[in-house]
Amino acid sequence: MTEYDLYARDLRRRVDELSDQAALIENRLRYLIAVLPVKKVLKVVDVARMQGITQASIRQKPWLLPNFGESDYEDKPTRWNVESVMDWFDRYGRDPQQAKADWEEHEREAMRKAHDGGNV
């Protein structure tokens, strides 16, 4: 067996171990979700806690909020379905710079629409 073969075998074994650990964590999370009360609607303060920052800080950085701070609901306070928040974190959770770039584009588009609407 060559050195490469040994390395490949060890790597496969480690990948299998990590896969088993991930499955265990997934099962534990499913259990916790089943037995713990889980919020269905989240507020700004909840999203801020998830990101480890204050509510005041997150309000200054709307690109860190789901839908760039636009609520899933018409009435106040600003709130989101938990699914919206999870989708947002799946998309931007690891890349806040991309969220900021997309937010800037979102703001430019909103300004263009407002400007075009004012000239009609």
Image: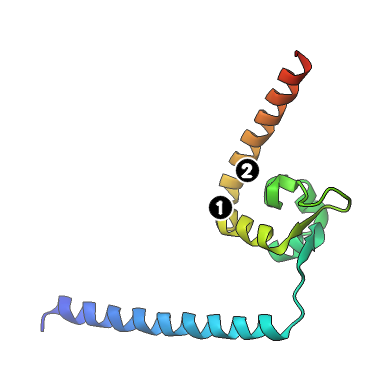
Q: Quadrant of residue 113?
A: top right
Quadrant of image for the N terminus? bottom left
Q: Residue 61: tell me if it is visible.
A: no
The residue that label 2 is drawn on is 100
User: Percent position (x, y) of residue 119?
Assistant: 75, 13
Nearer-the-camera pick, 11 or 82: 82
Residue 114 in the image: state x and y as whole percent.
Answer: 75, 24
| Residue type marked 2 | Lys
Specify whether 82 is left or right of 3.
right
Mark before the other along the chain sequence, 1 or 2: 1
Which quarter of the rendered picture does the C terminus lie within?
top right
Q: Quadrant of residue 38?
A: bottom right
Give above or below for 27 relative to 105.
below
The label number, if any, that marks residue 95 in the structure image = 1
Residue at image location 58% in from the left, 53% down from the top = 92
Front-most of residues 72 and 51: 72
Q: Is residue 11 visible?
A: yes
- CA gap, disc 1 to disc 2? 9 Å
* In-image side of 34 versus 10 (left or right): right
Label 1 neighbour load within 10 Å: few <14, some 14-19, many 20+: few
Q: Please, is residue 100 above or below residue 51 in the view?
A: above
Q: Position of residue 106 (x, y in %)?
A: 65, 36
User: Which three-letter amino acid code belongs to the residue tagged 1?
Assistant: Asp
Write the residue at 48% across / 80% down: 22
Q: Check disc 2: other Cα within 10 Å, few if <14, some if 14-19, many if 20+.
A: some
- Residue 40 is marked as none
Residue at the far right in the pictured view = 76
Residue 86 is drawn in which quadrant? bottom right
User: Residue at position x 75%, y 20% from top?
Assistant: 117
